[in-house]
């Protein structure tokens, strides 16, 4: 179905399920493994005898050589992207006699959730796990619904040197990694997409453990001019539509001909598409900046010139580059901000697994810095702060 104007509000039933998810989390916190066994049987329809994957090597051995080679290539591509953008271990400088800087240090324990649903998503484990390896994370734990842990997930887990793989799905998996159980290790941060129950659980545990963000349904905004190939646009929109009927799919174009071809073809589909005529590419970019989409595709002439005008997007593809390439192998991540979160954060990268520690050394600071510090400290009523500064330098 084609629509000609963007919705003012996107549907969001997140708040409606919070009470139910909160009950699941509290049950896991209270009963630990016992709760998880019960919840897995209830929600995933599996009666487990263990919460850990114990035959990972045997399972990984079932992966075909072609698939192993493909995974190895994608692993290297994601690794190089993140290694390229990784900051140095230490950055610093000096001003007014004060030496200062930051140390970049990796998070120690990370939990990765690999969603299930109708399909298994081993590509998500690559996207979440490889940046963690680049950052230097020492302990990586993985959790995924028991009926979705396949040989490919096992093979990737071995490549990532994952400590343990848990056969747990849904909100109970998030709760287990956030608080720990008799079997599941407590982690410092949880990363990974998932359904609305998984996202609600991440939201609820975020006061006790780090999370990457709250990811909603997939989003794609394509900006196109007369030079764009309509068949490419149709394929790109349909590709992202494979994520489900809630996917947000938009074409902004200056071309009447493009609108005619694309709408004629997409009217056959069950998904909803938004196709809008704009007066200029600049106007389209203004709209995209307001939407702040997960994926933004600039299928226009001189795409690099317009790249610098983009303020809000999870990931951008230029020219004829398919957005689906980012979903798999370009290097940037496919775990990206949705629901306009791209206005305040980016996709998962090596930075999600690093923390910045600031430092300062003031052996012979400028007197004006000392006096300014003392004056402001006393103004705020912190006299010992002022004295502790003054006694050292006077």
Image (tube, grey):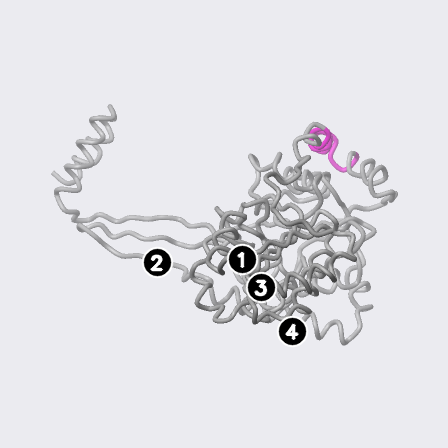
SS assignment at label 3: loop
How would you rate the neighbour count of disc 2 (Cα within 10 Å): few for under 14, some for 14-19, many for 20 or more?
Answer: few
Q: Quadrant of the C terminus?
A: top left
Residue nearest the observer in this picture, 257 or 112: 257
Above or below, 129 relative to 188: below
SS assignment at label 2: strand
Residue 261 image offset from top left, x and y in percent: 69, 65
**Alpha carbon of mark 1 to alpha carbon of mark 2: how far?**
19 Å
Question: Which numbered disc, 4 or 3, marks the residue closer to the eye?
Answer: 3
| Residue 349: mark | 1
Residue nearest the observer in this picture, 151 or 303: 303
Q: Is residue 181 left or right of residue 252?
A: right
Write down the quadrant of residue 91 in the picture.
bottom left
Question: Which numbered disc, 1 or 2, marks the residue closer to the eye?
Answer: 1
How would you rate the neighbour count of disc 3 (Cα within 10 Å): few for under 14, some for 14-19, many for 20 or more?
Answer: some
Question: What residue is shown at x 14% (from left), y 40% (from top)?
Answer: 393
Question: What residue is shown at x 73% (from left), y 59% (from top)?
Answer: 266
């Amino acid at each position: 179905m084609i629509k000609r104007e963007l919705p003012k509000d996107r549907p969001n039933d997140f708040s409606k399920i919070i009470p139910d998810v909160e009950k699941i989390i509290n049950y896991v916190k209270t009963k630990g493994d016992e709760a998880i066994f019960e919840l897995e049987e209830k929600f995933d329809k599996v009666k487990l005898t263990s919460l850990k994957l114990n035959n990972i090597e045997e399972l990984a051995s079932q992966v075909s050589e072609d698939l192993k080679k493909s995974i190895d290539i994608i692993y290297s591509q994601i690794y190089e992207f993140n290694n390229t953008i990784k900051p140095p271990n230490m950055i610093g400088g000096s001003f007014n006699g004060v030496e200062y800087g930051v140390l970049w240090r990796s998070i120690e324990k990370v939990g990765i959730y690999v969603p299930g649903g109708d399909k298994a998503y081993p590509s998500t484990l690559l996207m979440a796990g490889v940046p963690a390896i680049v950052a230097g994370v020492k302990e990586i734990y993985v959790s995924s619904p028991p009926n979705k842990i396949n040989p490919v997930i096992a093979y990737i887990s071995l490549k990532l040197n994952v400590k343990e793989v848990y056969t747990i799905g849904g909100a109970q998996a998030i709760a287990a990694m956030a608080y720990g159980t008799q079997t599941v290790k407590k982690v410092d941060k949880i990363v990974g997409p998932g359904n609305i129950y998984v996202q609600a659980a991440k939201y609820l545990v975020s006061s006790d453990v780090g999370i990457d963000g709250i990811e909603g349904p997939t989003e794609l905004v394509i900006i196109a001019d007369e030079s764009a190939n309509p068949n490419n646009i149709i394929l790109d929109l349909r590709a992202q539509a494979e994520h489900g009927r809630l996917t947000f799919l938009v074409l902004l174009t200056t071309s009447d001909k493009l609108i005619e071809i694309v709408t004629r073809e997409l009217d056959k589909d069950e998904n909803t598409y938004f196709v809008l005529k704009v007066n200029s590419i600049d106007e389209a970019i203004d709209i995209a900046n307001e939407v702040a989409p997960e994926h933004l595709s600039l299928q226009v002439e001189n795409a690099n010139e317009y790249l610098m005008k983009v303020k809000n997007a999870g990931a951008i593809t230029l020219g004829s580059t398919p957005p689906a390439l980012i979903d798999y192998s370009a290097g940037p991540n496919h775990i990206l901000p949705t629901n306009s979160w791209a206005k305040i954060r980016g996709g998962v990268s090596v930075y999600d697994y690093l923390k910045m520690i600031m430092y300062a050394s003031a052996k012979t600071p400028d007197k004006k810095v000392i006096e300014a510090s003392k004056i402001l400290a006393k103004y705020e009523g912190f006299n010992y702060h002022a004295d502790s500064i003054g006694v050292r330098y006077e």
